[in-house]
């Protein structure tokens, strides 16, 4: 029997070079929430590098531009050199494959997320089986937090402190022109 490899990551083909295992974390991030921050931070523990892929869907009118969303994400992670932020265009699976990613990282907040996420993961796997999807269950304390609800609540004057990082909160207050008492 041959000796096991010194680094188990080298023993399975297609998992990327040790030290260079890259995951892509896609989404709209309009804006970044504490739920996103937790998923990206966990991705940075599991992988060597993470690229946050900010969707620039021309059919959706975002509250924040791609540049604003990018700056907020970088700031929230203190410009961590292991984290890149890029614009996602075209097919996610191909985009991730072209960058050498081994995984697409998605957070699951509740069972309701699962059906759609499973369908996307299976379609992405059909397109490029070398890029797997990794689902991370969100922390129960933030499972109700979504970018769309945060925007709606903030626009109507509700308090969203603690649901988004402080820099995003400041940007939201500036953009929506409302102040939390
Ligand atoms: O934050 P969101 O809006 O839930 O993110 C959705 C996103 C960006 C992950 C999804 O819309 C996506 O993958 N878009 C890229 C286009 C694509 O690959 N479509 C086929 C999906 S199987």
Image (tube, rainbow, N blue to C red):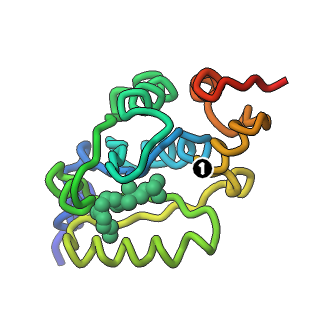
Which residue is depicted at the point 36% across and 28% down?
Answer: 67
Q: Picture quarter containing residue 176?
A: top right
Q: Is residue 64 above or below residue 132?
A: above
Which residue is depicted at the point 66% across and 50% down?
Answer: 149
- Left or right placement of residue 67 versus residue 138 in this view: left
Which residue is depicted at the point 72% across and 43% down?
Answer: 153
Q: Mark 1: is the Cβ under 8 angstroms from ligand 1?
A: no
Q: Picture quarter containing residue 161?
A: top right
Name the secondary structure under disc 1. Answer: helix
Q: Is residue 114 above or below residue 82?
A: below
Residue 120: image x %, image y %? Answer: 37, 72
| Image quarter hosting the N terminus | bottom left
Residue 69: image x %, image y %? Answer: 43, 33
Near-viewer residue (5 or 113): 113
- Left or right placement of residue 45 versus residue 177 in this view: left
Residue 39: image x %, image y %? Answer: 52, 49
Give the image quadrant in which the ligand numbered 1 is located.
Answer: bottom left
| Image quarter hosting the C terminus | top right
Residue 5: image x %, image y %? Answer: 21, 61
Q: Which residue is mark 1?
A: 148
Q: Is residue 147 above or below residue 168?
A: below
Residue 178 visible in the current orientation? yes
Q: Picture quarter containing residue 81?
A: top left
Taking the view exactly as shown, the residue that stands out farthest to the right is: 181
How many marks overall?
1
Which residue is depicted at the point 75% across and 39% down?
Answer: 156
Residue 105 visible in the current orientation? no
Near-viewer residue (111 or 39): 111
Q: Is residue 56 above or below residue 14?
A: above
Q: Residues within 10 Å of mark 1 (few under 14, many from 20)?
A: few
């Amino acid at each position: 029997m041959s000796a096991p490899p010194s680094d188990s990551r080298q023993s399975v083909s297609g998992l990327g070079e040790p030290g260079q295992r890259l995951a892509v974390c896609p989404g709209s991030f309009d804006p970044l929430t504490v739920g996103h921050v937790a998923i990206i931070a966990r991705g940075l523990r599991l992988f060597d590098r993470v690229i946050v892929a900010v969707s620039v869907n021309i059919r959706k009118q975002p509250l924040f531009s791609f540049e604003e969303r990018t700056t907020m994400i970088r700031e929230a992670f203190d410009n961590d050199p292991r984290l890149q932020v890029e614009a996602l265009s075209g097919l996610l699976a191909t985009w991730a494959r072209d960058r050498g990613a081994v995984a697409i990282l998605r957070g699951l907040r509740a069972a309701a997320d699962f059906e759609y996420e499973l369908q996307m993961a299976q379609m992405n796997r059909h397109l490029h089986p070398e890029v797997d999807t990794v689902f991370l269950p969100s922390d129960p304390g933030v499972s109700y937090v979504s970018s769309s609800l945060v925007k709606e609540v903030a626009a109507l004057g509700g308090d969203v402190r603690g649901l988004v990082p402080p820099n995003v909160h400041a940007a939201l207050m500036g953009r929506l022109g409302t102040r939390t008492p």
